[in-house]
Image (cartoon, rainbow, N blue to C red):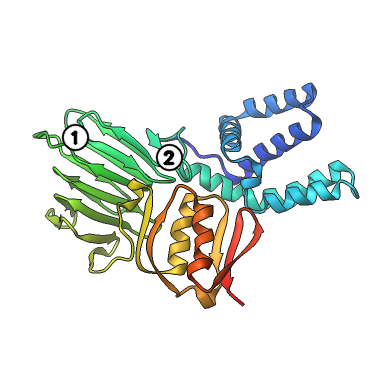
Amino acid sequence: MTAAQPSPKVVKQAIQWMLRLRESGNSPALAQQCEQWRSAEHAHELAWQRVIHLHQDLDLRALPGAGVALQTLETSQRRLHRRQALKLLGGVALLGSAGWLAKDLETVSAWTSDYATATGEQRSFQLPDGSLLQLNTRSAVDLTFNDRQRLIRLKQGELLLTCSALANPGRPLLVQTRDALLEGFAGRFVVRQDSACTHVSVDQGRVAVHRPDNGELLWLDSGQDWRLDELGAHRLEQVDMEAAAWSEGLIVTRNMRLADFLAEVSRYRHGFLTCSDDIADLRLSGVFRLENPETLLQLLPQTMPVRLNRRTRWWIRLERMA
């Protein structure tokens, strides 16, 4: 499945229409103008529906920068005309947030994928052949099941595939990522597509990597972790996180850098999460529950010399304890 993605500019326009309608008290005249804008181009309607959908799930305050801008709007009402304050919001929040929102919507859009998950969501799907597909946060896949193949295209994010034990001669079970074509057999494995590579972790059974350069198969065995990129396949002798733990609602770390841990936690929440350079290399090991990332973050100062600096609910920076 393919579909054009709305540009950040169009997404920003959709946000502006939403704010104008909210500011006007949903005036009929402005609502009609918004309808005309939506019907002018398919991309306009697509952006509008996505903004509405995301707004229902997140509330506008989830946008990076928007919380500060909305607070500015609320307090500046006492000094500025509301229209001027709204213009300030458009200039401050939207310019900083539209690109982020467009990226987030493109990442986990149920409108352009057969199966998808939102931020912090995990879902399970029974496939036509009896295999079990589990998607982690911000993930999207397309399926092609026909007489010749069973293909799962991982467009974004991470999946856990438990292959059906039933034999399907002539119909290989394939997972396609940007970096590799994987073939699963009776077993269970995790595939994660990052910006620069694909990570594969085999929990049970074996996985074959099809190598178009020489036509041969590279076999990945149970208990192995691999990195696949444009330079080839690389066995990872040590990993700092249990690959499949998310399917049980956990992050399980082994001597993991704090900066890498925060990057992992940020996949399950909206907004920005970072740390100062002087604590980035601190290490932590443990089992952390994903059901509430905010509660998880509150645990860190109890076990590490760090404190949470909250600029807003959605913008958190960890710093060394003074």
Q: Is residue 94 above or below residue 16?
A: below
User: Mark 2, residues whose alpha carbon is within 10 Å: few (<14), some, or many (≥20)?
Assistant: many
Which residue appears at 32% of the width and 52% of the height? 245
Residue 154 locus on image (x, y percent): 33, 44
Residue 20 in percent (x, y) is at 76, 35
Q: Amino acid at mark 2?
A: Thr
**Which numbered marker is on residue 117?**
2
> Relative to the observer, which residue lies in front, 306 or 274?
306
Q: On screen, 135 above or below 209?
A: above
Disc 1 and disc 2: Cα gap in Å? 25 Å
Amino acid type, label 1? Gln
**Coordinates of residue 313 in the picture (x, y in percent):** 63, 53
Q: Nearer the viewer, mark 1 or mark 2?
A: 2
Q: Quadrant of the C terminus?
A: bottom right
Residue 203 lies, in percent from the top left, at: 21, 52
In the picture provided, is 31 more to the left or to the right than 203?
A: right
Q: Quadrant of residue 160?
A: top left
Asked which secondary structure carries label 2, the reply is: loop
Observer-nearest residue: 129 or 250?
Answer: 250
State whether residue 150 is above or below residue 160.
Answer: above
Quadrant of the image for the N terminus? top left
Q: Name the residue: 20% across, 60% down.
A: 224
Residue matched to label 1: 149
Task: Confirm whether residue 1 shows in the render.
Answer: no
Give left or right: position of 249 versus 44: left
